[in-house]
Amino acid sequence: MSSMKQSEILLVVEDDAELRDAIVESLQDLKCLLYSFGNAEDALLFAREKNCFAIVSDFRMPGMNGVEFCKRIKRERTDCRFVLLTGFADKQTAVEGLRFGIDDILEKPHDLSRLHDIAESYLFDRLAQNEKERTSALRYRAEFSSSFARSIEEIESNVSLLKNSRFKPNIVHDLIKSTGDIVETSKAVLGAESIHLVASAYEKLLSSIQGQGNVYPHGVIQVLVQGVEVIKTLAADFAQVRDRVVNLKPVIDALGRWTESSTEGELEDVTANDTLFEAEVRVDEEQPEFLGVDEAVISGYLSQYRLNEAALARYAAQQATDYNSAHLVVTDESLNTMRALAGELLVVKNAYNATMQSLLLRSLGDTQHQQIEEMRQSLDLIAEKIQSQVLDVRKIPLRDVFYHFPEMVKKMSLDSGKAVSLEMSGLDFGVDKSIADLIAAVTTRLIWSSLTFGIEDIDARIKKSKSVSGDIRIHASQLSDMVSISVSDDGYGIDPEQIKKRATDLGIITKDEAYLMQPKDAMSLLFIPEISRRRALADDAGIVYGLEKLKTDLEHRGGHCSVESSFGMGTRITVEIPVTQTVRTEHALLAESGGCQLIVPMCSVVKITPIKDLILSKVDGRMTCQYEGVTIPLGDFRHFVDKESKQNFIDRSDFSLESIVLVVSDEEHSLALVVDEVVDQMDAVVQPFDSVIDGLVGFRGTTLLDSERVAFVVDPETLLGAAYAA
Amino acid sequence: MQLSEDILRRVQETLEERKNKGPHWKYLLVEVSGQKFGIPMQQIDEVLESRRWNALPVTRAHMLGVLNLRSSVVAVYHMASLLGKSSEVEVNSGSGCVIVVHDKNRRFGLWVESILQVEEYPAQDLHALNDGQLLVTHLCVEDNESVLMMDVERVA
């Protein structure tokens, strides 16, 4: 370990002052700074500001408990280790909290020497990690310095050529390329933020003058010459590891003015004296802690320039703090109660509507009729608003869920020796609290896959004339009842022939099948366990492993996973995660069939017709009917999903002439679902099955009709699947 | 003679007292096909009488249907069927009692024709049955009558 000075921080959070002091006393000899707090809220504020290597926290405290504290801090500080102190009675709850990142649980009465050993081991881990990061950073700095020297030399020579050459567009093109290299490489290097910022502005100016012909005003050439000098000055600071604050605002402002001027086609000298060095470049030696860039400048220019992850992380941290201070803390229990009440309100609303309909059939006066109708409409409106509010209350901004990814990618890229940048888009919506953790875990896994298997190392990328830094892009979008996350990279891409070869070697497909298989279909082989679980081999570049488990996990929750790839260009993995735990309503038909109440989603019903209007026929002993010229299976739900009923062939005489047929359809198939009666239309509150009832093929949950009756919600997808199964 | 009877009585009392001081387990006793069964009281949430359930759309082994318990949907098992006994009385939705029970992760109902009473048994009187697969985990013999104690967690 290169440094044993006491700069690492450990927090002790315990509401019992006596115990807190005892714990602090027992950890005194550790070579770290100890801070203690009597509650989790204060400790959280502190830990957000300071990077602690470990937190020792009591479970049961006034206000926020230890598990919630851990959950919150781990969202922002994944590398902070967490020890939970708990009484025996709370141990089960605490153990459940392990999924939120608790590293160790110590039961009361505490063994302080054991706690000391744990904290000491965490401290050693952190110091080892620091050393590793320092070594990696030095390597990056060396690599950056070397590539920077080449690029700046090219820029200098091209800028001097620009003054006299006849073929200026070609020179500007070369200048953009060299500057682009600096922009890309500086993005991944700690301490090169200021270079990145100025080089980005410089690149923008070059892009804006590209195509302006061969004549440029003297002013812009002067700005370009001086811009090189500014970048070189910053690079000299970087090389000498000078930690000082440089106010880059005037420089970037000047470059920006020229960029705007040229974009608008008025490339004239903006002002005679507007040169970069005449603008004030303030150097403040009094603030040695900061690496290179004035934070206020970064914040001001965020909207205009792509910043590196460190700056973005700081910005996001500020946002997260603002977000938290603007909201109230609501317990899970309250949210769940609200959700249940909103559900019950809809049930009551449905029951009320049903009762009113039967009452209205009797002779009521017009006035009473109108009053009841108005009440019904108000009730519908309020129920809808409450439901929408409850959904919103449970939502966490996706930006907060993904907040730690930039930092994580930076660490992963340091560990792997690859240069990687991360871009995230589409994060401007919220996800239900219950699936936020799942989304974060799945996306983490995909990022890891892209970084490990997808992105090439620096040498390989240079050989392929790709940018030194690989790109990982996360895009999120919200579908009707799904959240879609795609993670793409510009790495190896997957060679379909390579996968086919693996599959034929393992005997999964024959050589003939492999020959005929389309590249798109070859990607589906990645989900086969024998292939997915293989360990990566040296010649497996780009092939993503471990997808089978991801797909199985997602499908278990009703989600999907797909892979698209272009060999040599990159890979995109998309997951769709259902929003299952929210109050979910389904506009549906309520039907009765064989004593069961069924809810059939309206979106899947393409036709409702009396059975007597259909021409029925038997195919292979099974009842069918014609729908739009296609023969489709016909039966009540038991004939499609119940093993025993499936055995018994049915006849037309099995159905009453009064029966109704609902043609249920998806994109590929249709079936004719026979019901005794269509009772009503309603907005059904769908409750997913619990673990006892789970797995009813053809159904996705239940809905309550009144205080006794329960209806089963048909799942068109699995019902059609069962009907068309052999 | 008087003395020995007195000693015997005191020994008896001491044994009884020792027995009473040991751990006791409470069970709700039910009768299924003439056999007494005990359900641990700590696994019972409530007992519902004459509650109607809704038939399942797809038949499930031992499961009668689901009932709406204050806006929660709870599955109802046929206890006699779970225990491998055939119920002589026809099961009708709304007859008998539903005992709502829970284990670590689940909550469900057990339908029985009727319930008997709550009994407390000293732990030492409960003889463990070794087969880990059975619903019944302990046996207790009282007044020449056996009572079989079940564990809700083993209902699959």
Image: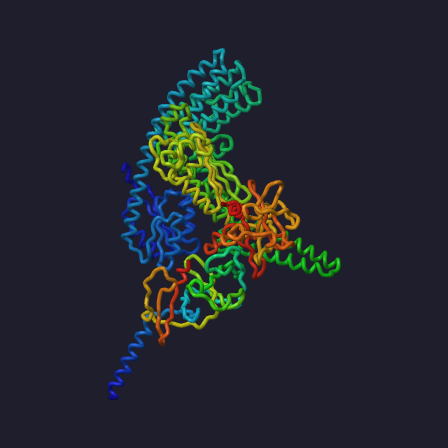
Q: How many marks?
A: 0
**Image spot of residue A58 (x, y percent):** 37, 54
- Residue farthest to the bottom, as pictured: B2
Question: Is residue B121 in view?
Answer: yes
Which residue is depicted at the point 63% across and 52% down? A660
**Image spot of residue A403 (x, y percent):** 45, 40
Task: Looking at the picture, tell me which residue is in the foreground, A56 or A513.
Answer: A513
Q: Quadrant of residue A78?
A: top left
Task: Looking at the picture, tell me which residue is in the foreground, A373 or A664.
Answer: A664
Indicate left or right for B29 with A630 as reference: left
The quadrant the N terminus of chain A occupies is top left
**Image spot of residue A444 (x, y percent):** 42, 40
In this rendering, the answer to whether A632 lies above or below B25 is above
**Image spot of residue A676 (x, y percent):** 61, 55
Indicate left or right for A590 with A435 as reference: right
In this rendering, the answer to whether A190 lies above or below A719 is above
Task: Looking at the picture, tell me which residue is in the foreground, B34 or A456.
Answer: B34
Question: Is residue A590 in view?
Answer: no
Which residue is depicted at the point 29% across and 54% down? A112
Which residue is depicted at the point 30% across and 79% down? B13
